[in-house]
Amino acid sequence: MIVPKYYEDLQVLHKNTMPNRAYYIPASGRMDNLVDEREASDRFMLLSGQWKFRYFESIYDVKEEFYREGFCLDGFDTVTVPGVWQNYGYDRHQYTNTRYPFPMDPPYVPCNNPCGEYVRSFVYHKDEKAPKAFLNFEGVDSCFYVWVNGVFAGYSQVSHSTSEFDVTDSLKEGENVLSVLVLKWCDGSYLEDQDKFRMSGIFRDVYLLKRPEKGIFDYFVKAQPTEDYKNGNIEITFQYQTQAVPVKGQLFDREGGLAAKGEADGEKLSLQVENAKLWSAEEPYLYTLVLETEQEVITEQVGIREIHVKDGVLYINGVKVKFHGTNRHDSDPVTGFAISREQIMKDLKVMKEHNINAIRTSHYPNAPAFYQLYDRLGFYVIDEADNESHGTADVYREDSDWESRRKLWNEAIADNPDFTKATVDRTRRCVERDKNRPSVVIWSMGNECAYGCTFEEALKWTKEFDPTRLTHYESALYVSEKRKYDFSNIDLYSRMYPALSEIHDYFREDGSKPYVMCEFCHAMGNGPGDLEDYFEVIWKYEGACGGFIWEWCDHAIDLGKTIAGKKVYAYGGDHEEYPHDGNFCMDGLVYPDRTPHTGLMEFKNVYRPARVAAFDQDKKEMKLRNYMDFLNLKDYLTVGYEVLCDGLVVGKGVVEDDKLLDIPAHAEKTVPIEFQIPGEGKCFLKVSYYQKGATEVLPAGFLLGFEEIELSDAQRENQKVKKLFSNEAGKVEFEITEEDTTVTVSTPEFAYTYDKLKGLFTEMVYQNQSFIEGPMEFNIWRAPTDNDRQIKEVWRQAKYDRIVTRAYDTQVHVGEGEVKIETSLSVSAIYIQRILNIQACWTVRSDGALDVDLRVEKDTAFPFLPRFGLRLFLPKSMDKVTYCGIGPVESYIDKKYAGYHGVFEANVRAMHEDYIRPQENGSHHDCDYVTVKSHRASLTAAGEKTFAFNASVYTQEELTEKAHNYELSESPYTVLCVDYRQSGIGSNSCGPKLMEKYRLDEKEFTFKVRFIPEKM
């Protein structure tokens, strides 16, 4: 072997690396645009770009010392750095959640440890004023050995952290060669078992920094307001490269004015700022700090802010703050872990568009320059160390239930002193690198490792090093019963996916620490539901400081397009890997290309900046509540409103006087508005909130959210529905043809055939136009959503996906202008008892309208139903939909706040929400009517009580069966489901069970609907 086995030695984490320090880019002069223009620094030399690369299946296959000067590179390919070699076509992609991709045998990894050789030549010119040279790697997975001109420079691990080497003595004037050997696994891989695709290589930037012989090596900026929050105290402590040097500090405000200045007194520099502008996510005010030594200038952005806990409540700048955040992985379907500034800006822009104010860097530090964007754009950050050893919970045990495993989870690593050095190292590399970032308000020790002596030491060091921030570690809940543990250095009580009852219990029984949901409302596929419920409980308790949705984006691999042009995204198991966890990585608020899911739209409107807290229709007044933490509404937004009657806008207005919106953060105020309500019809007031002034990422006038209030009394009827139900049936001669299995009701205008064995119609011909292409069906199944992951197996055991219908008795009654067909029937499945008993009364009216009245009784032995309704197969040509209900995006009983009540039109194909793993989608809740039409005919379904529907080009069987959206085949029909309702969406793919109030679990209910055919 050409390298020592540092990669399996817990005592060798790094060789020849520089001490940890804060991230900064030095220059010979001031630089203001630190993120966008770091390459403009004359002391910065980017080495990213085109490198030579050679891959080996095993470290033992590496026989040649490729790093030697003059080594022939004929067998090497050319690849782009940053990048991952799985995307170069080497090795294979693998997605696994908790399970290690190798035997659990720390510190050892497989002997056949894949590796990659990287070589890059570059020209270096020495600078007399900055003769020192430091080589930086911002991210390499999993460990690497480095040579410069054939000379060993060092070794390092911890994939998502910066490793810096002093290469001054190895460099020469002119042409130089940098060689790197990267291994796929090392002992550190046991601490990098995050829920993600496993990728390898140099995935972040590589660069040289030219530095003077003497100067600043590191600095720690503590910028905090005074006790009255009026002024600012900035204290900077320095570490020098060799000895203290004179440092001049100047602080400039946003307009370029000098706010403070001073000179360092040895290791410290103190600056006082009068009438300081404080930093928050809502007002991310940054000062520019210029630190000047004889040969070098360091420019830094400084935000003055503080965070503390008092009486179990979290405060920022003395204000109670709520996090409406998301967890974010580095993930792109084309570039993998390698994320550019343009890619992260796209993420942050979409976050700002959807009212996200906080990010948890799950589950490792992000690229260092990204935090400067978080500072600038305004995000609260939980900065998380690169530490997760979840796979230790998956080892074989005879007693494998979760309660037994959780008590032993910590033994292998978290409470093993052999790993204390590595654990503390990972924490320090995170904290010391990002310590100057005002956006970082909380340090997280890592994720899902359990707890023990390793984390006790990491937390102790963190609190001693930086008492200005809070600490977090959710996995402290998982300990053995062998000893008492020290939790004194953890500031927050953190939970993942708690049921609402658990949150109530915490505040009833304890409440001593702020309660944060570091993961909640699993956003997998069609989800999450119940966001509004969690919003309500967050605001119920002062100590509930919010949460972070799991997670930001769907993880996938872009495999191009099908012949038909459909995008092909791959997830776990699509690469013949073992182990894998399927599509559990498709769990984001956005698709892989960052198109928002409807779940993100739901999040945006739940977390709108203001809400109508009370409404007086007679006085025409609404009480607005400001849900911002710092901003006055008059400075942040404008308000407009519309009156919609039966789904159509009949009036609108704006709140023109800014004084009316003079509502401080967390305050309420009554605001008068002018509107008129029509004498008839179902009316709603829709109030919308718009961005007042432009920001870096949002234009003025951008919609920040909306809400609607039902006007007048609840007895008002939709006038179109009222008309549809008030038409009197005319006299007509019905022809009734009854046989053993069918009843046909005919007039000169139509002929409808009823199946007496199933209690449903099999044919509907109206004015020589067929309106159904197959028999109607009772429908209780839905293609399982990802959030049905747990309950779907229960549903399958109940045979909800295999139902049969059996009628027992059918009676036909001919009346004046109508024919009633009454049937008693049941819904059951092979080898099990009846699931539902139904008394069905169908009424065929003389005008061709068809009424159904279903009285349903469910056997309570069965689990709650996915849905109940009727499924119709319409002609494919009937592909245009008009409906009055909640739209325009899909809506469900617990996922409806992204939409509003209106009249909407859409093409059936466009109503499909194209989740990468097919599932139930596209439903619309609380509808008065829906019309599906072609250029020749239309069919309307209307209810005296609202119902749900979806119209699709796919059957639920197709959506259930297929694993990927690109595999779907369209139905030869337009599939129309008219539902009494569906059960909610929830987030039980990882979160708690669906709340009872959102389950379709009634013992008895009645469903009535009218179908009206019409020839165009």
Image (cartoon, rainbow, N blue to C red):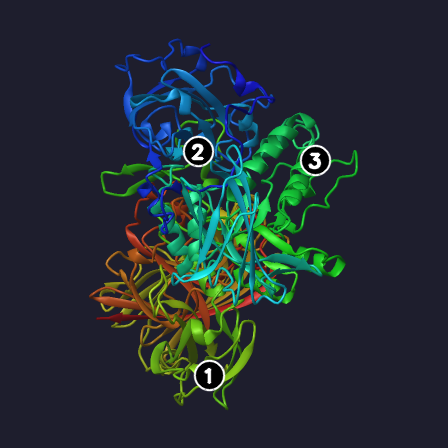
Can you see residue 404? Answer: yes
Residue indicated by mark 2: 139
Disc number lying in front (2 or 3): 2
Residue 414, x across and y down, in percent:
66, 33
Residue at 61% over, 33% down: 423
User: Is disc 2 placed on a helix, strand or loop?
Assistant: loop
Query: Which numbered disc flags the more N-terminal residue, 1 or 2?
Result: 2
- Identify the amino acid type marked 2: Gly
* In the foreground, 773 or 29: 29
Can you see residue 813? Answer: no
Residue indicated by mark 1: 660
Position of residue 706 relative to residue 331, above or below, is: below
Disc number lying in front (1 or 2): 2
Residue 106, x across and y down, in percent:
60, 22
Quarter location, residue 486: top right
Residue indicated by mark 3: 452
* In the foreground, 587 or 239: 239
Position of residue 700 relative to residue 741, above or below, is: below
Asked if residue 472 lies left or right of residue 479, the reply is: left
* In the foreground, 460 or 449: 460
